[in-house]
Image: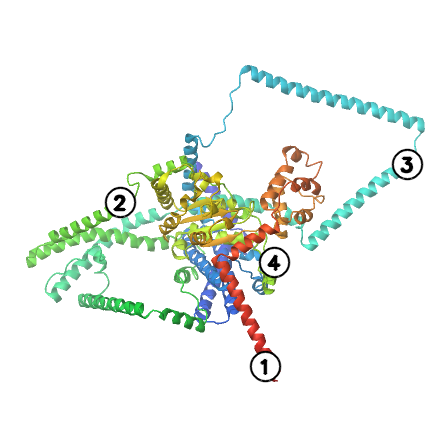
Amino acid sequence: MAKESSKALVLDSISTLWERREGTPVRSTYNKMWKDAQKDLDIQLQREREEFLQPEKDRVKVFKMLATSYIKYMQIFRNLETAHDQLVHWQKRTVIRQVLDGVIGRILEMKKEMVDLENSEFHYMDNILEDLKLLPEDIEVPIPRYFIKEKLEALQEREKILDQILLNAGLQTQKRVKAMTFEEAIKMIQVAERARQGRCRAAFMKQIYLEEKRERQTKLQVQMGPNPDAAATCIQKVWRGYVQRKKTEKMREEEMIFLGMSLPPHLKATNISHMHAGQINALQGEVQERHEEILIKDKLRETEGLNIKETLQDQIGQCFIECRHIIGKFPDYPTEEAGGSMAIFSQKTPEQVAAELAAKKEVALQKKAQQEKKVKEEGKEKTKGKKPQKTGKKEEEEGWKMAPSNFLSIMEEGNSQYKAIWQNRDEGWDFLQDHDPELIKEEKREEVEEEIRLQVDELMQQKLENLKLAVDGEKSNKQKKGRKSEKKKKMTMRKKISEMEEDLTPDRTIDSLYRELVEEGLLIKAKTVNLYDYVGEYSYLGTTLRQVDIEPMPSLADVRQLIALYGILPLGSQTVHEKAPLVKALLLAGPAGVGKKMLVHAICTETGANLFNLSASNIAGKYPGKNGLQMMLHMVLKVAKQLQPSVVWIGDTEKVFSKAVLKAEEEMNPKRLEKILPKFLKALKAQDRVLLVGTTNRPFDANLKPFCKVYQKIILIPRPDYASRFVLWKHIILQNGGAITNLLNISCLAKVSDGFTQGHIVQVVQAVLSELRLLQMTRKPLRTAEFMTSLARQDPVYKEEEETFKVWYAKTPLGKARIRALADSERAGKGKTKEGNKGKGKN
């Protein structure tokens, strides 16, 4: 009964999706979105074939091309991600997923090209957005929801195990109700009852006082006599004041709506249809998980299995007879490595197969000759010396050219698959839109054939041996094959021995290593923080400042984008991580309170990654000595690779590379990881979804060269600007239970809090919005002055500190390259002006 009721609910929810709006079913919205995204992708792929293959010298034009493509791909990414999340049809979702991975990877490749071109991690595209009539929100990087959805059960199970280990180790306290004695319970009841009686008595005495006051006033009025004019004036004054206040409030609201600073009432109200859509989304996950692959596969095996087996046997037998007729003897049966009977089913005659074998031998010989030539050429290049510099100059003369992509083939394959199957497919019959049985049959038929082929190979191999023995008198070569297999076994044993020598914990399971790391406090529980919780606005003056040769400080929205591009997207998808530009280590540098740790936890939350804490303060006293340190990093790396994605976090990472260790920190030995960290990063390969993230408040205390060698990507996080502070005050007050009224001037708070970080604003709001203050909110609204006193107690980030961060960043490899590029552009500009002046003088 329960199953039937849940089915009915799902069907009802789907039928609501089928309701028509202006003659179009609601469920077709996401199909249309997918169709539009595929059209845009087709246009973009065609454009890439035409534009990016030709070299271009003008760097401004190149950046415009790259930025436009980046924005277009971002729009395609957003539409595909929404369609993938909302569509129930799982076969469509698999096609979308393939294209989605390709688009994500291409975005990361575009980002790398823009960074290499501008020598900066931050780019400003205001002009291009204006030309395309888009908003800054349109280039916000969306986080694919399938990163978490596809492994939700595994993540929940892992979280339970982690909580249990922490409880058993005593590192996490469980909330328990304290047992009370009988006397304590009576005392508590007495205290509560006496307090209640006191409140009742106070209310009763207040009522008596008010009654006595009212009696005195009536006696005075009787003695003085009624005054109708005074009463009328009082009523008029109150009424006119009330009416005027209402008018003023209405005018203010209309003005704010007109200026676009607040939403109209009909948009503020919660819509019933949105609530219903939320219920449908909850049921949608159940429908998405329903697959009927196994049932269809079993039916195919029952109905078509015997026919497939017979036809395969007949075809192989016929091939044996034809081969003996042409060659004069029975052929050798192809091995499993060669494909078994697949080599026979290539729809070729035995003569063609023999010709192919001869051609393969010739190709092998040619390859050997080519390799020998390459070795000779490499030797000549080493002797000559300075030839590669000439090629670099030639490339500069030719101009910029797009690097080869690892994702264009994936996108083109997905695009062609969409065109071949889904573009013009008639789906009028498919009401539920959950799966297409015919497509499943086509896919599963190949699997069934493959399974049956393996069985047929064993039978036909035995049959061929019997035929050879009976007709030609030949014996099987099983003994020789046995010798080969023995050799293979020996080779595999040698490999295993070498692996065992490298593996420091060969006899231990991943579960035991995981438990030990949790108990030692090296594997910690990540806080549930989403990336959109890191609130910040877009920088609207970036382009104008760069045009005046002033390097702008990055905005919080720019930082959020880089975290998504370098941290979340590669860790979330295996395909993207393997083929995209590899980022092994990421450094978050900025003043205290700008949200560096929050961003680390956000990466883990959005990707479902494990969080390892290797901060100097956390590993102090653990795994002492050189061997202990090696064992610790080996365990971390082994567990991180096995349970990927994983994030290895080093807080206050400047201490690892510090120029001089403070006396107070000598016992902690913060420089333990300095020499071993590069080896740790070398052990990470493209298929390992493991990211090293360092956070620092004082990066200028570290030695720059080893610091920048470890962290290939450095993100400088500044204090928030006015636009970000305005949004932050609003968001944090509402998040902590406050209410924003006309008495609370957010703009004033944003202006006054210049120089303060997000952490300061959070502390101020939490200090003001206590439990008592929240209870008084209805009768005593929040005022601006309440936050001023608490804000005055905080220490802001002064301009001198911000300048030190800028100076330090200018010394990093990317900062130096940026300064060099700006200097070159200035020289080129001066050269052009001099040439122009000479030309004018001649005229």
What residue is disc 2 on?
501
- Left or right position of 458 against 281: left
Above/below status of 506 relative to 191: below
Distance CA(mark 4)–CA(mark 3) = 59 Å
- Quadrant the C terminus occupies: bottom right
What residue is disc 4 on?
540
Distance CA(mark 3)–CA(mark 1) = 90 Å
Q: Amino acid at mark 1?
A: Gly
Residue 200 is situated, as x and y percent measured from the top left of the image, at 71, 21
The outermost residue toward the top is: 183
Distance CA(mark 2)–CA(mark 4) = 57 Å
What residue is disc 3 on?
230
Helix, strand or loop at label 1? It is helix
Distance CA(mark 2)–CA(mark 3) = 102 Å
Above/below status of 767 relative to 290: above
Name the residue rendered at 89%, 36% in the picture: 231
Q: Amino acid at mark 3?
A: Ala
Assess whether mark 1 and mark 3 are in contact (beta carbons under 8 angstroms). Answer: no
Whichever of callouts 4 and 3 sits on the residue coming sooner in the sequence is: 3
Distance CA(mark 1)–CA(mark 4) = 39 Å
What residue is disc 1 on?
839
Whichever of callouts 3 and 1 sits on the residue coming sooner in the sequence is: 3
Classed neighbour count for the residue bearing mark 3: other residues with Cα under 10 Å, few (<14), some (14–19), many (≥20): few
Residue 354 is situated, as x and y percent measured from the top left of the image, at 18, 66
Helix, strand or loop at label 2? It is helix
Helix, strand or loop at label 3? It is helix
Above/below status of 260 relative to 391: above
- Quadrant the N terminus occupies: top left
The outermost residue toward the bottom is: 843
**What colour scheme was applied to this rendering of the protein?**
rainbow
Assess whether mark 3 and mark 4 are in contact (beta carbons under 8 angstroms). Answer: no
